[in-house]
Amino acid sequence: MSQSNQTWVTEFLLLGISDDPQIQLLLFVLFLVVYLITVFGNLLLISLVLTDSQLHTPMYFFLCNLSTADLFFSTTIVPQALFNLLSRRKDISFIGCAAQLLLFLLFGCTECALLAVMSYDRYLAICDPMHYPLIMTGRVCGHLALGCWASGILVSLVDTTFTLRLPYQGDNRIDHFFCEPPAILAVASADIHSAETAIFLMGILILLAPVSLILVSYGSIIVTVVRMKTTSGRLKAFSTCGSHLLVVILFYGSGVIAYMTPKSAKLLGKLVSVFYSVITPMLNPLIYSLKNKDVKKAFMNAAIKRLFCKL
């Protein structure tokens, strides 16, 4: 049958990670637990930052934006994945797939930019503490956060446009558990070189460029910390940056593997996608709260106030 006589795709079938019913049930339980922790952890962190005046600083302002991006990032993917794990027909409409693709890229790319801005914030706080309050004003923080969201919108629109402008006819089986650009392009009915090139260039913009800024920022931070004369000052500086650096390694490491390296085995690609799209949004609030005295103190204060209100 010629390509011109094939039916245009109106829906996609998401093949998921495995077709084994037992593995699907295990994944459903895992994804559900992770998603509930993600929602609770990020909402808690957002509420603490908004209500506790001690957390009204640039670092926690950006952290609040990061938690917001994480919350929507996970919600774009996990509920659909949970539904498909219990459904025999794992379908998603073309419009639904397009919306998921757009939102996934928007929130994911915004998080990339936010992590870079947060590293710059830590660089100023440690390497130039005298001028830090003068530079990181509320207005500057607002503009930086707005720029992060704008970059997410730009990259998501470009990647989504180049991915969905291709014809999709005949085969509609996506070998993935959500609508991600490489998986969708694999079933396109035309040459995908231009789309892959555009996505790669956008990857340089939103992955490699921020990574370069992060490396420069943390290189300067390490030099400054090593030159500190007091051990307490070094420990304080490292504790301030440790949480953020761990989140950066987890998120960017998996993102670079997925988008900036040659195509690997399909199963490995899916596992990498699970890590940065499902696991990392859960880890971020846990990492920041468990290793941060200010957040733990704000949580205790909120808990005490709620207890007294009930009494």
Image: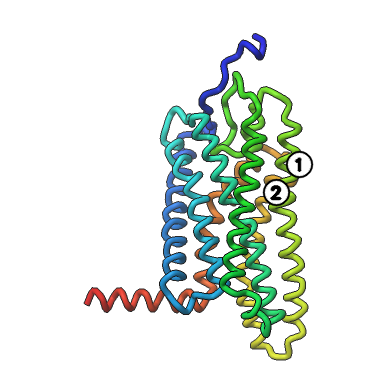
- Residue in the image at 68% along x and 55% along y: 253
Q: Is residue 113 above or below residue 75?
A: below
Alpha-carbon distance for marks 2 and 1?
Answer: 8 Å
Work out whether residue 223 or residue 162 is closer to the camera in this orientation and state it.
162
Q: What element carries label 1?
A: loop
Label ID, residue 262: 1
- Dot 1 alpha-carbon crowd within 10 angstroms: few under 14, some 14 to 19, many 20 or more: few
Q: Quadrant of the C terminus?
A: bottom left
Question: Which residue corresponds to mark 2?
Answer: 257
Q: Where is residue 166 in the image (x, y as percent from the top left)?
A: 66, 27
Specify whether residue 221 is in view: yes
Which is nearer the N-term, disc 2 or disc 1? 2
Please name the amino acid that badge 1 sits on: Pro
- Dot 2 alpha-carbon crowd within 10 angstroms: few under 14, some 14 to 19, many 20 or more: some
- Residue in the image at 42% along x and 66% along y: 47
Please name the amino acid that badge 2 sits on: Ile
- Residue in the image at 66% along x and 14% along y: 3
> Residue 58 appears in which quarter of the rendering?
bottom right
Q: Where is residue 59 in the image (x, y as percent from the top left)?
A: 57, 72
Q: Where is residue 89 in the image (x, y as percent from the top left)?
A: 45, 27
Work out whether residue 30 or residue 51 is closer to the camera in this orientation and state it.
51
